[in-house]
Amino acid sequence: MKTINVPVAMVIFLLTMVPFYACKKGSSNKPACRIITTTSISDAESFDYNYSYNAEDKLASVTYKNRVRTFSYSSNTAIVNETLSGSFSYKRMITLNSNGLVSNVKMEKNLSGTEWENTVYEYSGTQLIKITTTKSTGGTPSVETFEWANGNLVKHQYSGNTTTYEYHTDKPSGDGDFFHHLQYANYGFFFIKTKNLVKSFSNPTYIATLDHSFDNASKISSVKVTYHYSTPVTATFNHQYQCN
């Protein structure tokens, strides 16, 4: 079985504004929709991410397997607490910038807060260009850089590795796409918003291709990612929406 090494900036767990991309009520009077369940299916296992929302339609909790993430909000900040089998896992303190994108995340790994990681997100407008992470243990900060073209992320560099991305230029991004799920499930906020749907991404280890499916309301119903090794590995995310 191959281990899937998804780029750090997309995952940070696997990596999920207030709240989200689309399916909001507008002048067209289309129903407001939100994802309530995402079923993750891979060669190794299948499980559900379940989402709940507060009275302001902000993400209140994410649960999957034996993990529970709860969200609380104040002004431009949010606190995310995660438990694992009922015990403390971590605490994230998230700060948003004026565009509603993540500008800083401090993650405390123990109850006393003495073990931590702090991540700073830098942008050019709404395009992420740099991530810098420092740790309580010291050492040289880790740095990730990002390059964009035509509203889309095209290159991500981290620790000597480069991942490049290609897009369906005729298909806009939206709720439930690849970047959306990886950020939404883990953070509830975004640091990467692309103009179009990802078609593929690659690095020296593998090439991954993506297939998006849509429901009869043109919402993304599933994303299938195929990692092309000597033996292909697949991961599929199926979304269930609740519409008002």
Image: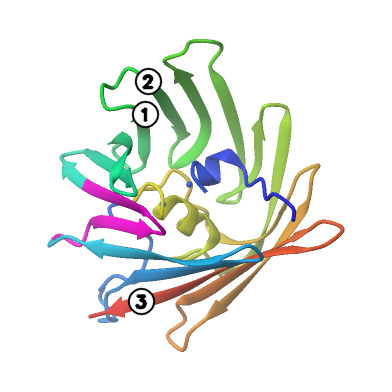
Crowding near pointer 1: few (<14 within 10 Å), some, many (20+)? some
* Rendered view: 198 above or below 15: below
Q: What separation in Å lies between label 2 and label 3 (alpha carbons)?
A: 37 Å
Element at badge 2? loop
On residue 6, the disc is none
| Residue type, label 3 | Tyr
Marks 1 and 2 in Cβ contact (< 8 Å): yes
On residue 109, the disc is 1
Residue at figure coordinates x 58%, y 65% from the top left? 45
| Residue type, label 2 | Glu
Q: What separation in Å lies between label 1 and label 2 (alpha carbons)?
A: 5 Å
Residue 109 visible (yes or no):
yes
Quadrant of the drawing holding the N terminus: bottom right
Residue that mark 3 sits on:
241
Q: Which residues are magenta?
A: 56-71
Residue at figure coordinates x 46%, y 65% from the top left? 174
Crowding near pointer 3: few (<14 within 10 Å), some, many (20+)? some
Instruction: Examine the structure image and report whether residue 58 is included in the region drawn in magenta.
Output: yes
Residue that mark 2 sits on:
115
